[in-house]
Image (tube, rainbow, N blue to C red):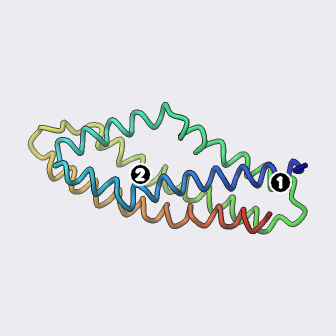
């Protein structure tokens, strides 16, 4: 039978892994696929994705993983790896997303897909959002590795 510590670390591993995978998918093929649609369709699609994600189970996993990591920290005998993994997850999933990707999403939400300047707005968004996403992906990928090592 698993201890509460093991359950919390395993849950944080799975949760952070799912979030890292979602970020990885955007970094490796989703944004490129949207870009191939052309700016008006890409903008509409990304606006729809951004609206839907906020009402999805993905967002629940995104935000529940951090307190689960906190529980693991509280229960750990040797906290080093769990603290590092939780800090990496917080940095990638919360801080980078909140400071980088979310403001760009909000800015894109105000763009009319067929309006003059939409092409430039999409191009700027795609490049800037993509940079933030690659950074958060790299940081988020390290979190489940740290949790796994803590087990």
Please determine whether, in this image, residue 107 is positioned above or below residue 36.
above
Q: Nearer the viewer, mark 2 or mark 1?
A: 1
Instruction: Between residue 117 and residue 16, name the one nearer to us.
Output: 16
Q: Residue at x 37, y 63 (%)?
A: 131
Instruction: Between residue 100 and residue 92, name the one nearer to us.
Output: 92
Query: Where is residue 25 shown, x and y percent of the image?
Result: 43, 56
* Image-quadrant location for residue 92: bottom right
Q: Which residue is mark 1?
A: 6
Q: Residues within 10 Å of mark 1 (few under 14, many from 20)?
A: some
Q: Earlier in the sequence, mark 2 or mark 1?
A: 1
Q: Residue at x 87, y 66 (%)?
A: 78
Query: Where is residue 140 shown, x and y percent of the image?
Result: 56, 61
* Image-quadrant location for residue 128: bottom left
Query: Where is residue 36 shown, x and y percent of the image?
Result: 20, 54
From the viewer's perspective, is 144 left or right of 74? left
| Quarter of the image with the C terminus in it | bottom right
Q: Which residue is mark 2?
A: 101
- What is the total number of numbered labels drawn onto the structure image? 2
From the viewer's perspective, is 62 left or right of 69? left
Q: CA distance from mark 2 to mark 1?
A: 32 Å
Q: Residue at x 55, y 52 (%)?
A: 19
* Circle 2/circle 1 CB separation < 8 Å: no
Query: Where is residue 141 shown, x and y percent of the image?
Result: 56, 64
């Amino acid at each position: 039978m698993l201890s509460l510590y093991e359950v919390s670390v395993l849950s944080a591993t799975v949760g952070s892994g799912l979030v890292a995978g979602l970020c990885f998918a955007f970094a490796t093929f989703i944004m490129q696929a949207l870009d191939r649609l052309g700016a008006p369709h890409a903008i509409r699609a990304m606006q729809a994705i951004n609206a839907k994600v906020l009402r999805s189970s993905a967002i629940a996993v995104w935000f529940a993983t951090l307190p689960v990591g906190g529980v693991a920290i509280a229960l750990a005998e040797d906290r080093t790896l769990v603290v590092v993994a939780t800090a990496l997850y917080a940095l990638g999933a919360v801080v980078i997303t909140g400071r980088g990707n979310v403001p760009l999403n909000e800015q894109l939400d105000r763009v009319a897909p067929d309006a003059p300047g939409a092409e430039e707005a999409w191009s700027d968004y795609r490049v800037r959002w993509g940079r933030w996403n690659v950074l958060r992906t790299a940081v988020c990928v390290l979190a489940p590795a740290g949790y796994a090592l803590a087990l």
